[in-house]
Image (cartoon, rainbow, N blue to C red):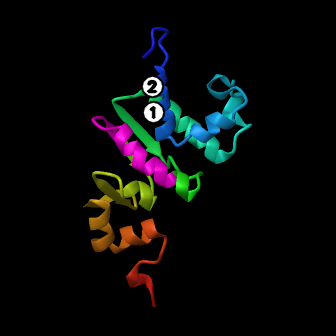
């Protein structure tokens, strides 16, 4: 942190990069000094989501819970976030509630919740290979036993 309690320039650059929000900052009229209106309505849904993620990462909590942190972004941004989020949160606990295969592929451990209960756990690759309901959910296809 800087002496005024804010993030250092280096840390700020890292969280903006991890949230893949550098283009949003560059396109904002005042750059990092831009005043964001209530709810950030001047930004698209994907831009808002990336700015919110940067803000959450900047807080650097010991435990961070993210719910669909890349649902409103394009595939390129989602892939960048998935890759960078892991590096940014190293050494701290991050729970990500998502069905995004890109995000799940970068996690250490996946819990598959079906009808309110954990029904399987392992790595993303293990669950894809061994749990048809998981594969159907993540790949947004029908489970093989449901195909007539």
Q: Which residues are magenta?
A: 78-94
The N terminus sits in image quarter? top left
Badge 2, how many Cα within 10 Å: few under 14, some, many 20+? few
Q: Is residue 67 above or below residue 126?
A: above
**Quarter holding residue 85:** top left
Towards the viewer: 23 or 85: 23
Q: Main secondary structure of the magenta part?
A: helix
**In the figure, is residue 117 to the left or right of 10?**
left
Helix, strand or loop at label 1? It is helix
Residue occupying the far top of the picture: 3
Q: Identify the residue position indicated by label 1 in the image.
A: 14
**In the figure, is residue 96 to the left or right of 131?**
right
Helix, strand or loop at label 2? It is helix
Q: Identify the residue position indicated by label 2 in the image.
A: 10
User: Looking at the picture, how far across and down is residue 53, in whole percent?
Assistant: 51, 38
- Kindly indicate whether the residue at mark 2 contacts the one at mark 1 (C-beta within 8 angstroms): yes
**In the figure, is residue 93 to the left or right of 97?**
left
Q: Image point 47% across, 54% down: which residue?
A: 79
Q: Image point 41% across, 49% down: which residue?
A: 83
Real-space CA distance between mark 1 and mark 2, rounded to the nearest whole angstrom: 6 Å
Q: Image point 33% across, 69% down: which residue?
A: 128
User: Looking at the picture, how far across and down is residue 111, in whole percent?
Assistant: 31, 55
């Amino acid at each position: 942190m800087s002496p005024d309690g804010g993030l250092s320039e280096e840390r700020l650059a890292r969280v903006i990069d991890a949230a893949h929000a550098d283009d949003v900052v560059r396109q904002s009229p005042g750059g990092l000094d831009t005043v964001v209106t209530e709810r950030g309505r001047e930004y698209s849904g994907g831009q808002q989501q990336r700015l919110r993620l940067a803000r959450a990462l900047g807080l650097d909590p010991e435990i961070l819970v993210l719910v669909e942190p890349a649902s409103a972004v394009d595939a390129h941004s989602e892939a960048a976030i998935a890759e960078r989020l892991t590096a940014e949160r190293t050494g701290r606990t991050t729970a990500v509630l998502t069905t995004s295969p890109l995000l799940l592929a970068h996690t250490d451990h996946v819990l598959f919740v079906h009808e309110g209960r954990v029904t399987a756990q392992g790595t993303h690759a293990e669950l894809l290979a061994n749990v048809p309901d998981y594969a159907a959910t993540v790949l947004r296809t029908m489970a093989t036993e449901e195909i007539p």
